[in-house]
């Protein structure tokens, strides 16, 4: 009764996002402790959701269309993640909830329409797991993760709005969505 595509998606999520991400992002340069409550929450949810889905799919079979949707969302998420990461070039992005201001603001590629596309990629991947598992418990975990990443994105927006990049970033905020490309119909002038 194992949902093979969704189980594989859960394992990919654990491997790619669970182990690769800490190596791709620069740790905070601040003197604050490594694990704040929010960082711990994200870590637990980030690892807990795929593990829950993996366990859930061993006993409950999801509809075929849900499994297909989950795999499509997973591939779309990985594409968005690596496309976003590549836009940084040699400037390695900071980790979630980092208080460090980046040297420059990226506005190319997916950043042209979404200010935090890497967070969007995480959430899309995890949403694929929820759809693929058809689990109410997984949906609750996803909602907690979404609230946490929205908070992280808002904190970064506030940090950059008060930095040396403030004027440029405020204009950029008017022309891009925080986690979704709400302003796709507007002409960019950043």
Image (cartoon, rainbow, N blue to C red):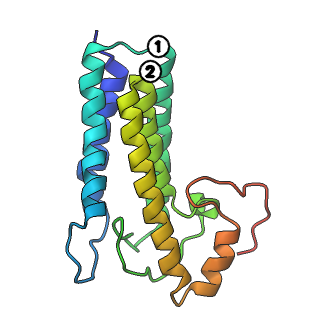
Quick check: 93 above or below 21? below
**Label 1: few (<14), some or many (≥20) within 10 Å?**
few
Q: CA distance from mark 1 to mark 2?
A: 5 Å
Is residue 82 in sight in this rendering?
Answer: no
Is residue 54 in sight in this rendering?
Answer: yes
Residue 69 image point, x, y percent: 51, 26
Q: Residue at image x 51%, y 57%?
A: 117
Q: Is residue 181 left or right of residue 92?
A: right
Q: Tell me the SS state at disc 2.
A: helix
What residue would you read off at disc 1? 64
- Quadrant in which the N terminus appears: top left
Residue 70 image point, x, y percent: 45, 28
Q: Are marks 1 and 2 in contact (CB under 8 Å)?
A: yes
Q: Residue at image x 53%, y 90%?
A: 164
What residue would you read off at disc 2? 67
Q: Tell me the SS state at disc 1.
A: helix
Residue 20 image point, x, y percent: 27, 52
- Quadrant in which the C terminus appears: bottom right
Near-viewer residue (136 or 81) = 136
Residue 127 image point, x, y percent: 45, 37
Quick check: 183 above or below 107? above
Quick check: 138 above or below 115? above
């Amino acid at each position: 009764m194992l949902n093979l595509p969704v189980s594989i998606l859960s394992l990919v999520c654990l491997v790619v996002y669970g182990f690769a991400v800490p190596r791709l992002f620069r740790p905070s340069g601040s003197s604050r402790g490594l694990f704040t409550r929010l960082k711990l929450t994200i870590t637990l949810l980030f690892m807990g959701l795929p593990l829950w889905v993996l366990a859930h799919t061993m006993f409950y079979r999801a509809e075929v269309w849900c499994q297909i949707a989950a795999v499509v969302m997973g591939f779309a998420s990985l594409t968005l993640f690596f496309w976003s990461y590549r836009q940084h070039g040699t400037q390695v992005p900071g980790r979630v909830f980092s208080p460090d201001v980046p040297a420059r603001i990226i506005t190319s590629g997916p950043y042209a329409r979404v200010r935090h596309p890497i967070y969007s990629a995480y959430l899309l991947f995890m949403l694929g797991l929820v759809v693929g598992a058809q689990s109410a418990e997984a949906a609750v975990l996803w909602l907690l993760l979404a609230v946490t990443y929205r908070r992280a994105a808002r904190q970064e927006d506030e940090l950059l709005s008060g930095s040396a990049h403030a004027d440029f970033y405020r204009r950029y905020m008017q022309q891009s969505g925080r986690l979704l490309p709400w302003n796709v119909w507007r002409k960019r002038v950043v």
